[in-house]
Amino acid sequence: MREPTGEVEEVPARALADRMGDPMSRLPAGGQGPLALPAEGDAAMRVASREFPIRFRGALLGYCERFGARSTGVLRLTDDRLTFTERNGPVHEWLLSRVRAVQGSAAAVQITPAEGGLVSFGLDRDSPRRWEELLRAQLRVVWRAEGRGEIAEFQPRIRGW
């Protein structure tokens, strides 16, 4: 890591994460910055509504989702919901209080709605990591507001303490 003074320092990844702290604490006054809401960006959505068994030599190893067609549009996160508006198409909306899991990857952020399935959002000119942080931070806010306590984990299912 290069300090603002120009000095180079080796820092373990865990120490960097600890320095970052709670994403909500990094929001500047007035709701500006990378984690401010509402957030909006161009995205591609794919939905997997079924799981298929994976077998090897007759033994069940697990299950795999198969995603449907890719739709492009605008992804938007507000205080209480995540919305995807397809270009020239329908609007998909998920209340944050009903999201059951959040998972990020290098290329996408995924949610599991209460209705089932898996919804994946690829972001054209934005960071899936930033969107995962946005969703996690806002889900924590929603859970606290609903008196559901603190979130202990987001994957494989959101679970409180």
Image (cartoon, helix red, strand yellow):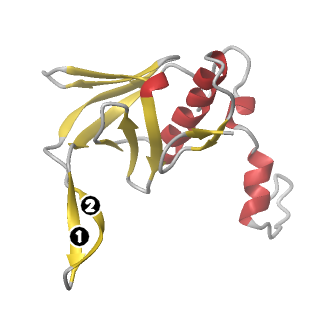
How crowded pointer 1 is (Cα within 10 Å; few <14, some 14-19, many 20+) is rated as: few
Instruction: Tell me the residue at 68%/36% (across/down).
Output: 23
The residue wearing badge 1 is: 54
- The reply to whether residue 127 is visible in this rendering is no
For residue 82, what is the image quadrant? top left
Residue 153 image offset from top left, x and y in percent: 60, 46
Q: Is residue 157 above or below residue 63?
A: above
* Element under disc 1: strand
Which residue is at the front of the view, 90 or 158? 158
The residue wearing badge 2 is: 64
Kindly indicate whether the residue at mark 2 contacts the one at mark 1 (C-beta within 8 angstroms).
yes
Instruction: Tell me the residue at 68%/28% (across/down).
Output: 149
- The reply to whether residue 147 is visible in this rendering is yes
Instruction: Tell me the residue at 68%/14% (across/down).
Output: 30
Residue 137 image offset from top left, x and y in percent: 61, 32
Which residue is at the front of the view, 61 or 118? 61
Q: Is residue 76 left or right of residue 35?
A: left
- Whichever of labels 1 and 2 marks the residue nearer the N terminus, that label is 1
Q: Is residue 49 left or right of residue 124?
A: left
- The quadrant of the rendering that contains the C terminus is top right
Residue 61 image offset from top left, x and y in percent: 31, 73
Numbered badge on residue 134: none
Instruction: Tell me the residue at 73%/38% (across/down).
Output: 22
